[in-house]
Amino acid sequence: MQQLTPRQQQILEMIQDFIAEHGLPPT
């Protein structure tokens, strides 16, 4: 797995939090 930049890591965590709250990925 490639290394993520801090910015990419932040975005990834935001998406995961969104899925955790809404139960589906953002469209």
Image (cartoon, rainbow, N blue to C red):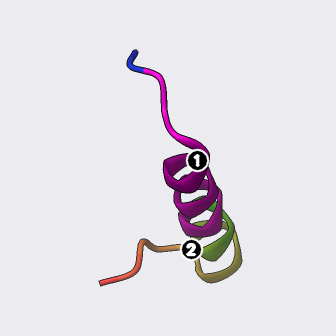
Which residue does the numbered mark 1 point to in the structure image?
A: 9
Q: What element carries label 1?
A: helix
Q: How crowded is mark 2: few (under 14 residues within 10 Å), some or many (20 or more)?
A: few
Q: What stretch is highlighted in magenta?
A: 3-15
State which quadrant residue 13 falls in: bottom right
Q: Earlier in the sequence, mark 1 or mark 2?
A: 1
Based on the picture, tell me whether residue 7 belongs to the magenta stretch: yes
State which quadrant residue 2 falls in: top left
Q: How crowded is mark 1: few (under 14 residues within 10 Å), some or many (20 or more)?
A: few
Instruction: Please tell me whether residue 4 is drawn above or below residue 25 in the rendered image.
Output: above
Q: Is residue 16 left or right of residue 21?
A: left
Q: Which of 23 and 18 is in front in this view?
A: 18
> What residue is rendered at 56% in x and 74% in y?
23
> What residue is rendered at 55% in x and 55% in y?
7
Which residue does the numbered mark 2 point to in the structure image?
A: 23
- Residue 25 location in percent, x, y? 42, 72
Instruction: Please tell me whether residue 25 is drawn above or below residue 2 in the rendered image.
Output: below
Which amino acid lies under the numbered mark 2 shown in the image of this protein? Gly
- Residue 14 location in percent, x, y? 62, 68
Q: Is residue 10 left or right of residue 27?
A: right
- Residue 18 location in percent, x, y? 61, 75
How many numbered marks appear?
2
Q: Which of 5 and 18 is in front in this view?
A: 5
Which amino acid lies under the numbered mark 1 shown in the image of this protein? Gln
Residue at the limit of the structure toward the left, as seen here: 27
Circles 1 and 2: CB atoms closer than 8 Å: no
Q: Which of marks 1 and 2 is in front?
A: 1
Measured Cα–Cα span from mark 1 to mark 2: 20 Å
